[in-house]
Image: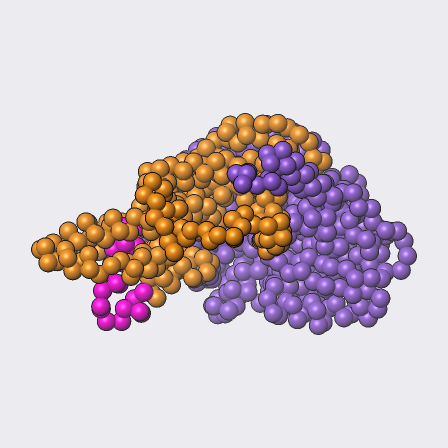
Chain colours: A orange, B purple
Amino acid sequence: MTTLNPSLPVETAIAPAPSAGKRRNPSDRQRRTAWLMVAPAGLHALYWIAIPVLATFGLSLTNYSVLAPLRFVGLGNYVKAFEDPIFLTSIWHTVVYTFFTVPVAMAVAIFLAVLLNQQIRARAWYRAAVFLPQVTATVAVAMVWYQIYDPSSGLANKLLSFLGITGPAWLADPDYALAAVIVVGVWQGIGIKMIIYLAALQNLPEDLYEAAELDGANAWQRFRRITLPMLRPATLFVGVVSIISAFQAFDQVYVLTRGGPANATTMMTYEVYKNAFATFQMGLACAKSVVLFIFLFGLTMLNRRVSGGDDDE
Amino acid sequence: MNARSPGLTRRRLLAGGATAAGLAALTACGARLDEPEALNGPPEGAITVLTPIFPGADGKALLEKTLLPQFTARYPKVTVSVDYTTYDYLNQKVTTGLTTGIPADVLMLGVGWVEPFASREVLSELRVPPEGLTGYSDSVLSACRWGGKLYALPVVLDTRFGIARRDILAQAGYSRPPANMAELRDYAIALTRRDSGGTLTRAGLDVQSLDPRQMFETVLFAFGGDLFRGGRPAFNDPTGVAALQWIADLQLRDKVIDAGFSRPNATTSPIADGRAALAIGHNNWWVTTQKQRPAVLGQLQPFLLNPAKPSIFAGGTLVSVSAASRRQPAAQALAAFLASAPVSLAAAAQKGNVPALAQLESSPYVRDPAHNLVRFGLENLRYGRPEGGIAAWLSLREEILNTVQSAMTGRQSAQQALDRLAVVADVAIADFGVN
């Protein structure tokens, strides 16, 4: 039997009524069993997530360098990080990279998802083709883009030459290198976003579209008034995940430019990597990781607020 | 029911966090607490070796099926497992090993790595009698020592020097390679070719196919400069600035090469396919040339950039023993074996590199006419100049890349770029605390 209490939230209001004689609170035995069940996952999270995260915070306050004895330095690494012009540059590059890759890739992904949700020939093939960059090794992707960006024989400059434009040395010119990396980032990130949007599109109720059509709505109006609002939860998810992913962009930079030329493409994650594994300044790398974490946390919260929070709110 | 879970009070959370952080810190410190077992005694036990050379299936087969069986035949109580990596990931592997307290017993490192690791007592002193060092170049051995003690031995060498296309020079009327830096620039300008649209079709001097750091150091040494003097930066003295400015001018002023014309580890080599007349190159470029343009192999002519101040860049792979190894006799024996002539020759042949021992100059591999770059490297090892030289080298070397790029792209003058690098170096040296 189900009771309905209009003064309560929906989930509570439609909850089954407790049957007489049954205990509402779990017994100690049930509680122990529950803890036992979650223990493997809990231990995994403790060992692989909680301890490393806490260690990162802890080590960011030390001069840990693998080779030197550990010494507490307080906030020294944070001061050092924010006095480092290259790290500040890397923050700016990361913001620029995120600003361009996330909205552009999301817009293209929605467009492609809507397109590939139609009954067109070879639809599965197109879907696979769009998703392919996502599952291709970045090293292989880099080889392809090296060819595309080759100043003398690459596709990019050949296309520009048809327009009478002399193309730059994309990856070797500090004025263009970041743009070149952003294009690769957009291209590589479209596939997964498109798949998520496609899944969301396939769950949209057809009757809304039928009703809109009966009301005389054209395709653009249906897209703007039905599809986009209905995709809001997916957009929130894709947005958050894409921002996190963009802030963690590393592969493209590592294989295409190594942060160069002249630090023109260095990103926060690359600086963390460089400090940790190239210069062995683990404490400094941890401090920069914490800064990155704070950025991501703040952006995620902001995104939730701007997008209206949880799906069920 | 209490809203707060009984097991998750704030106090317990804080206590758990503190314990976790403490555990992590102890784990981090643990690497240096282990004392190796007795240094003496017969070589025995299971040991590991970390190597960035012997790449691919061929390298694995060479090491594990041909070379290591010779070692284990001599030391049957020793078993060796191999951890393969590349130079790109070597630092991560070494770091991970040190952090977890289980570094490989035998480590293969690059030139410039001994100083930081030996200064922090990560490496064991190698017990090699003086006669065991016969045949090694003094310049290369200098990169194996720290504080007067020997911590590594060379296995194979990576040398860099000038390479000319003999046929292209002859077509332009040159009968010999350039004889000094000014002449090298003049040759480069004269040999540069562009099509009617201004597109570079042949670089006069390819300075982009080597890692920028190593290319700069090769030129710096040719100018007679030093990276460090007395443990202090010397690369930004007038000689160093002149060297970097010379490189930047080639690209920015003389236009002998355009930005993005080539890059390190490119699939094709400009000098091999005729897109460059001269290059600052690596001894193993004969390998790519032999695969892609065997007909021009004989046209590659190595030369000293500046015979008046003869030098070549001498990098390479060194073998050392971890101080944390609990099988010191076995690890020391394996290190000595890996630095021996047969292994050095086999490893060099597999990568197209220069074997580390002078006596291998007469080996068929070195004498092969197709391997004249290797022979040139070995014959000129007495002029070899290694990189590194200070304990804080690893904190600095990655910055040189951007320093060179800043100057080559005109973002900074050579003086500005090197002065900034000197500041970074001073901080790194001070932070490291040992010099």
B236 or B379, which is in the foreground? B236
Tell me which corner region of the image, top left, top right, bottom left or bottom right, holds residue B218: top right
Look at the image and tell me whether residue A217 can be seen. yes
Q: Where's residue B376, x and y in %?
A: 62, 57
Q: On the rendered structure, is B209 left or right of B284?
A: left
In percent of the image, x 69 and y 41: which residue is there? B23
In percent of the image, x 73 and y 68: which residue is there? B67
Tell me which corner region of the image, top left, top right, bottom left or bottom right, holds residue A153: bottom left
Quadrant in the picture for the C terminus of chain B? top right
Considering every residue shown, the one lying at the far front of the view is: A20
B103 or B198, which is in the foreground? B103
**Magenta-drawn stretch contains A113:** yes
B424 or A32, which is in the foreground? A32
Q: Where's residue B334, x and y in %?
A: 78, 60
Compared with B201, B79 (above or below) is below
Which stretch did the figure color magenta? A106-127
In percent of the image, x 81 and y 64: which residue is there? B78
**Magenta-drawn stretch contains B108:** no
